[in-house]
């Protein structure tokens, strides 16, 4: 039997100065003050869309939009940042177009672009609206290129790239409820098509990834009913594998999987790793919450200190401790076998800019 062992834990945050390189750290939270902190940027962010890309031979991390330290509607941002891992420098990028500050967007690095999808806006009265916009960010020109809008605008969805061409959005929240839709963008033709729907309870804040043509999706929040006109939310413990038909990307064969060790979790950082042949999940919270970290049950939510790995080869789960509990994530970028947890919330619902880098290896 194999197990997984955590090898490295280091960290990083988000930044603030237009189209310029940013310093490694800022007063108040210097690199090295916390175990594993690699660098600190001027702006802490949570629920930000994150991605990785190789640009002119440099490994780059990207962060778009999200929630600032104040955790109020006024702290939702359209800001964007890039981190050059080799040079250890941050760059402030142009804000996301449209002046629509949003949360729960997702980003995917594919070929030479970072694709940015949707999210939701929060009006003064608290009304939340899912946004349909899709942009392809060009890292060489720092320009956002509009792409075809999502047919069904969703936020808090799982996103991943497949076959160097397609980007899938699985389930998620649309305006007033969860949807089971699996929407696929053909990035070459800039057109959307529908794939086989998600078979479990529709969810938001779930997590997952793809390896080859095999998808793993876990947990998230489902609507359990309506009481006195108010939706009731509950966490889902469902885990599903989807196998994409190699001859037709619209066909997915879904099958239920065993739940992972421990309780189900909300807004884990996750991705599929071809190098590991596994889907990796980090952090999350056992108590679903609104964007400020307060649970729908009225109790403050706290982050998990676990990392979970679903090994596709042996079809089984492994778990290990993560040194800094974390939650409120929109992805887990991987470059050369190293995974990056960017921003999020720490214990006490504190918005963080830290990025933890993790490496796993199989041991007997």
Image: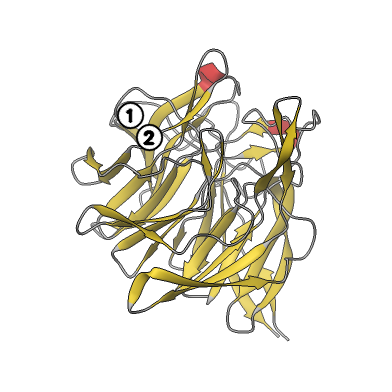
Could you tell me which residue is drawn at 60 percent across and 46 percent down? Answer: 205
Q: Secondary structure at mark 1?
A: loop
Instruction: Give the quadrant of residue 232.
Output: top right
Q: Is residue 59 visible?
A: no
Which percent across, then down, holds residue 222?
Answer: 67, 46
**For the image shown, how many numbered marks are present on the structure?**
2
Does residue 240 appear left or right of residue 169 in this picture? Answer: right
- Quarter holding the N terminus? bottom right
Residue 328 versus residue 85 in the image, above or below: above
Residue 341 versus residue 361 in the image, above or below: above
- Quarter holding the C terminus? bottom right
Q: Which residue corresponds to mark 1? A: 95
- Labels 2 and 1: the sequence-earlier one: 2
Instruction: Give the quadrant of residue 320.
Output: bottom right
Q: Which residue corresponds to mark 2? A: 80
Q: Which residue occupies the foreground of this view, 98 or 326?
A: 98
Could you tell me which residue is drawn at 49 percent across and 40 percent down? Answer: 155
């Amino acid at each position: 039997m194999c197990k997984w062992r955590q090898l490295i834990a280091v960290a990083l945050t988000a930044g603030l100065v237009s189209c310029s390189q940013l310093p490694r750290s800022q007063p108040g939270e210097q690199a090295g003050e916390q175990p594993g902190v690699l660098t600190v940027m001027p702006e802490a962010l949570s629920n930000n869309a994150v991605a990785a890309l190789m640009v002119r031979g440099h490994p780059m991390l990207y962060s778009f939009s999200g929630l600032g330290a104040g955790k109020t509607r006024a702290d939702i941002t359209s800001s964007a940042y890039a981190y050059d891992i080799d040079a250890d420098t941050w760059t402030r990028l142009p804000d996301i177009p449209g002046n629509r500050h949003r949360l729960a967007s997702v980003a995917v690095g594919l070929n030479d672009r970072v694709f940015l999808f949707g999210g939701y806006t929060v009006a003064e009265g608290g009304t939340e609206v899912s946004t349909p916009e899709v942009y392809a960010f060009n890292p060489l020109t720092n320009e956002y290129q509009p792409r075809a809008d999502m047919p069904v605008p969703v936020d808090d969805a799982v996103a991943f790239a497949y076959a160097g061409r397609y980007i899938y959005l699985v389930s998620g929240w649309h305006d007033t409820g969860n949807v089971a839709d699996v929407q696929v963008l053909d990035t070459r033709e800039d057109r959307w098509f529908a794939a086989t729907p998600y078979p479990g309870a529709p969810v938001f804040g779930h997590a997952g990834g793809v390896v080859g043509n095999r998808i793993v999706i876990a947990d998230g929040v489902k609507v359990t009913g309506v009481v006195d006109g108010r939706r009731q939310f509950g966490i889902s413990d469902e885990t599903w594998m989807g196998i994409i038909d190699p001859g037709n990307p619209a066909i997915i064969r879904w099958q239920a999987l065993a739940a992972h060790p421990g309780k189900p979790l909300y807004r884990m950082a996750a991705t599929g790793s071809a190098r590991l042949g596994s889907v990796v999940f980090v952090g999350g919270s056992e108590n679903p919450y609104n964007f400020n970290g307060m649970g729908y049950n009225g109790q403050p939510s706290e982050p998990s200190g676990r990392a979970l790995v679903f090994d596709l080869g042996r079809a089984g789960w492994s778990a290990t401790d993560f040194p800094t509990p974390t939650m409120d994530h929109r992805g887990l970028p991987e470059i050369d076998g190293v995974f990056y947890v960017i921003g999020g919330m720490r214990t006490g619902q504190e918005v963080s800019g830290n990025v933890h880098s993790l490496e796993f290896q199989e041991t007997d």
